[in-house]
Amino acid sequence: MHKDNDEIHRVLVSLAIEKALLDVGKLIYENVTDTLRKKYHCSIKDCYDNPQYLRQILDTLDKAGNVITVSLKKDLDGFRNLGKIEEFLLVMSR
């Protein structure tokens, strides 16, 4: 059961990331996913376990990175007590 819940939390975070990126623009979405793949050999789904990868990329996006971070905090705040979501949000807040 724990593994199933962890996967649900991973999907929840992944969807929030995709939404936040696409809300800023398709070009940003493509830039972030390409960087995740090329630099870290991972996808958006892997950011649940490795939020520092996304944080490092968002730090390079200036204002867009801040907008994405605010969106993630807003969308995931009600779920912060689930799994690693609190840890994810703490890394996003740095």
Image (cartoon, grey):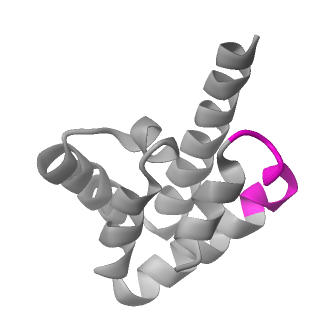
Residue beneath the point at 25% across and 50% down = 36
Could you tell me which quadrant the N terminus lies in?
top right
- Quadrant for residue 14, please give it: top right
Q: Which residues are magenta?
A: 75-83
Residue 3 colored in magenta in the image = no
Query: Is residue 26 left or right of 60 when viewed as pictured?
Result: right
Residue 57: x %, y % from top left? 31, 68
- The image shows residue 84, relative to residue 70, as above or below, that is above
Residue 47: x %, y % from top left? 44, 47
- The image shows residue 86, relative to residue 46, as above or below, that is below
Nearest to the observer: residue 75 or residue 7: 7
Query: Is residue 4 left or right of 26 when viewed as pictured?
Result: right
Q: How many marks?
A: 0
Residue 60: x %, y % from top left? 28, 80
Query: Is residue 32 left or right of 67 when viewed as pictured?
Result: left
Residue beneath the point at 44% across and 78% down = 65
